[in-house]
Image (cartoon, helix red, strand yellow):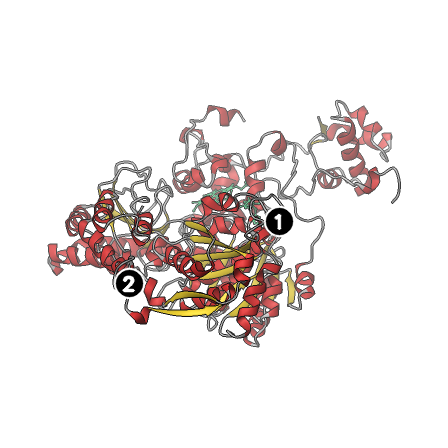
């Protein structure tokens, strides 16, 4: 979010009209160096500015699909530029997998289920309790969620953020 | 402005001289004003009207209404149910030439009529219950934004009940549709029913076109032995082939020749005036790249080598623009290019220069304007000179557009699997549809359609939609109207799953009832993607917390093929890219056999919120105190 605040704010002229949500444009200096940087800066800013680009974090496969999608929507990229752009975006804006931790106050039931290998019922219990009673502050709080054994929570405690 | 002047003249409220000076004051050239006067002239009160243009008819108010509608050349009247349609039904018994096409509610009546008018270029008539007017307004708004010629009729309270605040009545019905209509009238005298219908039709159909509304007291529609004058259709066709001012054309042509990097910005009015042929000639003559404005048509062949796509604020090609020729687009959609001169051509002086400074204003019929510009450019430079100027730009531009298009198709063909990438679906359709198919579309990003289908007035595909008003709930009805207008062309309509559920699945009823073979394709990504990206992409509390309050569409898991089936229409769900081809082929065969079809194509969604199935759950049943 820092990055968003730092960047120059201007209306992305014409397309701001229909992409009002993406009206912020990043200052070019914010983009990491690398092959493909210039192409991304010039092509990807055309319709919506660069904010949706740098605020997305995706796996290489996801970036590939997204770039193909944008090309379908009219992004003027040439055949040999597409893989370069995908590689640049994958390196510069990767899905953060730095740790496998998951935010129990923000994750959906489905995300909790996969990330923590819980049953659907346990995951839904976590979400349900949170919705009824507000955010968890520490791992022990999860003990209050219905259907979740405290021993199981303890094994997971290092993988949780709040 | 012009329309009100013509009105005033026809209704004898101003003199011819006042008309001329008013037109000039409104921005028309003296020549255009004179030509307009000439076309209106024979029908001004007191002028000699040849007897062949009128006839006297005696009948019920309803019969007079239908006789006058038929005189305009109308084949259809688009209706929904209401007791106010009684006089129409009675009249049609002896006037079977008028075919009623029914929809299940007023909103879709207007959508069907709008699609018909857009695709046929003719003024469409609709009639529904007096209490149905408010329901019709969303698509009236769409029609007014697109300047579609529609006449919307309804009955009205009985003469002695009007203004008593009784059931089915309010004081000022027309106030509510004022914004969405060019003109509106409540008819008080039975013998003037044809006159006001004539006026409504004429105003709706004169450029810039738009919807008009007429309400007729119900008892006047039932009144018998009314004698009235019916006007021949010819008596209210106003030739609008206004020629632009020659001096202004010359100035514009000079600027076009002088420009280092001119850009053509084509908008819907050029299609409405069939200006595409001279416009292509002009662009080719100058080697001028072309962009498409937001428009319910494709106004310049989008696969033409000079067509560079959408106008953005940082074009890759051409990089610098020193002159923008806005040809029939409304100005707000991207005409403020820094440092560029602007020429704006339109028949409507109110549109020209709105919010943008101008170098030249060209007022006139755009077909005439394009022809005049071609002629002027040719007269100012020798063929060799022109060829030399244009050659390099044309070659550069063609090389660019060809490469971009090839990359786009290659990327689209790479997409596969389940759920299906939308662009893969589009290329499959592009491969299989007729070369002159008609695409009716109401999808979020217009480029999804423009990128993959070649549209051209002369032998190519035709695009109708999305509306410039963008109020969802138009496309399904509109596609039925489009097919009625163009029965001999394949019609395929593309709808988002969200858009489809905007109160328009009802038009499957109309398609089924009248055997209107339209293929409806649902881009079914189980989300309102565009709004999800906007709302959650803001990364406010909802985005940060993965809260998708209003955009998730997977619960309930609506079965669109079953919805079609309930209307007697066959359909199927396509889950995987491998299944696309055979499914499209089955659909095309069904259309050939004369029935509509529905394809529910499961498409992938990604980006912010894509995996979120959370919404603010609530079960009223669980909150009851009594299980009743
Ligand atoms: C009458 C009306 N109400 C609301 C909107 C706001 N709106 C814009 S896009 C959109 C979502 C469309 O969803 P869908 O048709 O599924 O297409 P997708 O965004 O998934 O491509 C909505 C509701 C609108 N355009 N018209």
Co-location on one chain, circles 2 and 1: yes
Q: In this view, does B40 lie to the left or right of A58?
A: left
Is residue A74 visible to the viewer in this orientation of the structure?
Answer: no
Tell which subunit mark 1 falls on: B
* Residue in the image at 75% along x and 25% along y: A136
Q: Which mark is on residue A50?
A: none
Tell which subunit mark 2 falls on: B
Q: Is residue B401 left or right of residue B523?
A: left
Quarter of the figure with residue A137: top right
What separation in Å lies between label 2 and label 1 (alpha carbons)? 50 Å
Q: Where is residue B460 in the image (x, y as percent from the top left)?
A: 39, 66
Other-residue count near label 2 (Cα within 10 Å), few / some / many at <14 / 14–19 / ≥20 = some
* Residue in the image at 68% along x and 34% along y: A100
Between residue B437 and residue A153, name the one nearer to us. B437
Q: Position of residue B551 (x, y in %)?
A: 62, 43
Q: Nearer the viewer, mark 2 or mark 1?
A: 1
* Residue in the image at 64% along x and 40% along y: B550
Q: In this view, does B326 lie to the left or right of B558?
A: left
Between residue B529 and residue B113, name the one nearer to us. B113
* Residue assigned mark 1: B168
Other-residue count near label 1 (Cα within 10 Å), few / some / many at <14 / 14–19 / ≥20 = few
Compared to A8, does A85 lie above or below? below
Q: In which quarter of the image is the N terminus of chain B?
A: top left
Compared to A3, does B444 lie above or below? below
Q: Which mark is on residue B277?
A: 2
Compared to B301, does B357 lie above or below? above
Q: In the rendered picture of this protein, how many numbered marks are placed on residues?
A: 2
Between residue B117 and residue B182, name the one nearer to us. B182
**SS at mark 2?**
helix
């Amino acid at each position: 979010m820092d990055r968003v605040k730092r960047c120059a704010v201007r209306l992305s002229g014409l397309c701001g009209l229909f992409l009002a949500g993406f009206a912020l444009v990043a200052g070019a200096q914010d983009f990491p160096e690398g092959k493909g940087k210039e192409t991304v800066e010039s092509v990807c800013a055309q319709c919506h500015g660069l904010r949706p680009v740098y605020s997305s974090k995706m796996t290489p496969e996801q970036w590939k699909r997204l770039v193909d999608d944008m090309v379908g929507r009219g992004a003027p990229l040439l055949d040999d530029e597409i893989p370069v752009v995908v590689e640049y975006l994958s390196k510069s804006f990767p899905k953060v997998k730095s740790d496998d931790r998951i935010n129990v106050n923000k994750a959906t039931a489905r995300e909790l289920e996969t990330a923590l290998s819980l049953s659907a019922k346990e995951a839904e219990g976590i979400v349900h309790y949170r919705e009824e009673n507000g955010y968890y502050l520490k791992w022990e709080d999860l003990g209050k969620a219905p259907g979740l054994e405290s021993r199981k929570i303890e094994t997971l405690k290092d993988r949780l953020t709040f | 402005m012009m329309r009100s002047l013509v009105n005033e003249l026809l209704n004898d409220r101003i003199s011819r001289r006042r008309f001329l000076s008013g037109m000039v004051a409104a921005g028309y050239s003296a020549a255009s004003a004179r030509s307009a006067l000439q076309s209106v002239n024979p029908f001004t009160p007191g002028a000699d009207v040849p007897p062949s243009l009128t006839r006297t008819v005696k009948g019920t108010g309803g019969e007079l209404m239908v006789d006058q509608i038929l005189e305009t050349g109308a084949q259809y009247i688009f209706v929904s149910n209401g007791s106010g349609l009684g006089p129409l039904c009675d009249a049609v018994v002896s006037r079977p030439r008028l075919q009623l096409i029914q929809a299940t509610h007023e909103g879709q009546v207007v959508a069907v009529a709008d699609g018909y008018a857009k695709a046929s270029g003719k003024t469409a008539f609709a009639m529904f219950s007096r209490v149905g007017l408010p329901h019709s307004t969303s698509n009236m708004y769409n029609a007014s934004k697109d300047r579609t010629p529609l006449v919307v009729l309804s009955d009205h309270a009985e003469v002695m009940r009007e203004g008593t605040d009784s059931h089915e009545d309010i004081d000022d019905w027309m106030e509510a549709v004022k914004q969405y209509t060019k003109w509106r009238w409540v008819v008080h005298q039975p013998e003037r029913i044809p006159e006001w219908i004539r006026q409504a039709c004429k105003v709706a159909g004169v450029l810039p076109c738009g919807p008009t509304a007429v309400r007729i007291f119900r008892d006047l529609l039932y009144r018998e032995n009314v004698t009235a004058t019916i006007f021949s259709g010819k008596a209210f066709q106003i030739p609008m082939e206004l020629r632009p001012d020659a001096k202004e054309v010359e100035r514009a042509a000079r600027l076009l020749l002088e420009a280092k990097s001119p850009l053509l910005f084509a908008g819907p009015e050029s299609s409405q005036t069939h200006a595409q042929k001279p416009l292509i000639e002009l662009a080719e003559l100058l080697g001028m790249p072309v962009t498409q404005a937001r428009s319910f048509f494709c106004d310049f062949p989008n696969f033409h080598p000079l067509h560079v796509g959408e106008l953005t604020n940082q074009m890759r090609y051409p990089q610098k623009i020193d002159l923008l020729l806005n040809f029939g687009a409304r100005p707000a959609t991207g005409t403020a290019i820094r440092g560029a001169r602007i020429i704006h051509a339109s028949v409507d002086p109110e549109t020209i220069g709105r919010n943008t400074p101008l170098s030249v204003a060209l007022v006139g019929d755009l077909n005439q304007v394009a022809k005049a510009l071609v002629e002027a450019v040719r007269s100012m430079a020798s063929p060799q000179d022109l060829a030399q100027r244009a050659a390099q730009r044309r070659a550069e531009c063609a090389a660019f557009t060809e490469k971009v298009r090839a990359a786009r198709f290659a990327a689209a063909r790479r997409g596969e699997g389940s759920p299906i990438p939308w662009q893969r679906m589009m290329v499959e359709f592009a491969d299989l549809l007729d070369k002159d198919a008609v695409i009716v579309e109401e999808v979020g990003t217009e480029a999804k359609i423009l990128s993959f289908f070649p549209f051209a007035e002369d032998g190519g595909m035709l695009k109708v939609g999305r509306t410039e008003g963008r109020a969802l709930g138009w496309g399904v009805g509109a596609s039925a109207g489009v097919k009625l207008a163009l029965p001999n062309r394949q019609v395929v309509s593309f709808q988002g799953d969200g858009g489809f559920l905007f109160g328009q699945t009802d038009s499957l009823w109309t398609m089924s009832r009248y055997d209107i073979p339209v293929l409806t394709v649902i881009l079914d990504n189980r989300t309102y993607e565009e709004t999800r990206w906007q709302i959650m992409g803001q990364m406010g509390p909802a985005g940060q917390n993965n809260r998708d309050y209003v955009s998730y569409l997977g619960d309930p898991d609506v079965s669109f093929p079953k919805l079609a089936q309930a209307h007697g229409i066959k359909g199927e769900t396509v889950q995987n890219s491998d299944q696309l081809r055979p499914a499209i082929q089955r659909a095309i065969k069904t259309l050939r056999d004369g029935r509509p079809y529905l394809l529910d194509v499961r498409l992938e969604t990604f980006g912010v919120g894509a995996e979120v199935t959370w919404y603010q759950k609530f079960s009223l049943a669980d909150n009851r105190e009594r299980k009743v």
